[in-house]
């Protein structure tokens, strides 16, 4: 596996991978890889000839009081995992390479980024859209793969790619979960053993709300019950529990398909997100 840190070398390496009409899948990450990330890599290997993984902890998507400095970083461990998965190339730029001096451009996907995590983390999705657009231009993949755990992010990236005429396919990969249902996340490492045990209340509450809504229950009551169950399970606060149109992310007060139950909650210093399809 090649590990590349400068853009000129990256362009030459990707061009070599594409020789003979071969295709390239990009899996963007911030490192601290877990089984969920590796499931994206495996999807990439199924749909393309070569997989490129990027590792970049993007400062522009962190707020001033968030965990940028503390975000887990272990490139050597991550690289070893990617070698085992048959990844062709690891793109690992530093901040100066990604945002050279004088960088003054950002991308805003206005409507899709305004609610939910966008409201709780102002500017977050501008940082995400900007860095993903740069990664698309740098790697020039045929397909890019993102996890469905951040459904809002996936919707924003799809809209951004469509609006800016990026010539690639964007695939969403199913959420990888632990045995108790908690969605895998690099931030799960922040939880103490006691918090981690209690965190199962989060997916349990959401699954109960999905079943209630799918069964015809009042949407507002189902959402309120889920929020109460999350807090009762040991979370300190709930940023939101919402039923949304799966494509436009419009909040729904009456169920209609396709819909997604979206949620974010905080336990101590850790903020977790999750979502489920409602059929």
Image (cartoon, rainbow, N blue to C red):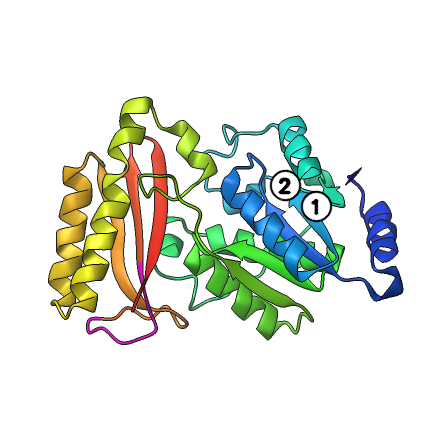
Residue 103 sits inside the magenta stretch: no
Disc 2 element? loop
Q: Which residue is mark 1?
A: 98
Name the outermost residue toward the bottom: 256
Q: Which residue is mark 2?
A: 56
Mark 1 nearby-residue class (10 Å; few <14, some 14–19, many ≥20): some
At 86% across and 57% down in the image, what residue appears? Answer: 15
Indicate the position of residue 79 as horizontal and vertical percent values.
Answer: 68, 33
Toward the viewer: 16 or 251? 16
Above or below: residue 263 compared with residue 236: below
Indicate the position of residue 47 as horizontal and vertical percent values.
Answer: 66, 61
Q: Is residue 24 left or right of residue 13?
A: left
Kindly indicate whether the residue at mark 2 contacts the one at mark 1 (C-beta within 8 angstroms). Answer: yes
Disc 1 element? helix
Q: Which residues are magenta?
A: 253-261
At 59% across and 39% down in the image, what residue appears? Answer: 57
């Amino acid at each position: 596996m090649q590990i590349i840190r400068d853009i000129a070398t990256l362009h030459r390496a990707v061009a070599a991978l594409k020789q003979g009409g071969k295709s390239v899948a990009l899996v963007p990450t911030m490192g601290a890889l877990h089984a969920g990330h590796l499931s994206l890599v495996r999807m990439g290997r199924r749909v393309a000839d070569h997989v490129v993984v990027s590792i970049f902890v993007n400062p522009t998507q962190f707020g001033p009081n968030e965990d940028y400095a503390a975000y887990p970083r272990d490139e050597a461990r991550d690289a070893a995992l990617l070698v085992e998965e048959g990844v062709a190339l690891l793109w690992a730029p530093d901040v100066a390479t990604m945002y050279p001096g004088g960088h003054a451009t950002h991308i805003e996907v206005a409507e899709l980024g305004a609610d939910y995590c966008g409201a709780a983390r102002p500017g977050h999705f501008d940082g995400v859209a900007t860095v993903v657009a740069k990664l698309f231009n740098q790697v020039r993949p045929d397909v890019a793969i993102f996890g469905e755990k951040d459904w809002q992010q996936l919707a924003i990236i799809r809209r951004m790619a469509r609006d800016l005429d990026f010539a690639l396919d964007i695939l969403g990969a199913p959420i990888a979960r632990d045995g108790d249902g908690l969605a895998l996340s690099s931030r799960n490492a922040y939880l103490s053993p006691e918090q981690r045990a209690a965190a199962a209340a989060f997916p349990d509450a959401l699954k109960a709300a999905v079943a209630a809504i799918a069964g015809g229950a009042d949407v507002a009551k189902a959402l309120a019950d889920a929020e109460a169950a999350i807090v009762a399970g040991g979370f300190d606060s709930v940023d939101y529990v919402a039923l949304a149109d799966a494509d436009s992310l419009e909040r729904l007060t009456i169920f209609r398909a396709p819909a997604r139950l979206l949620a974010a909650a905080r336990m101590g210093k850790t903020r977790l997100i999750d979502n489920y399809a409602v059929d």
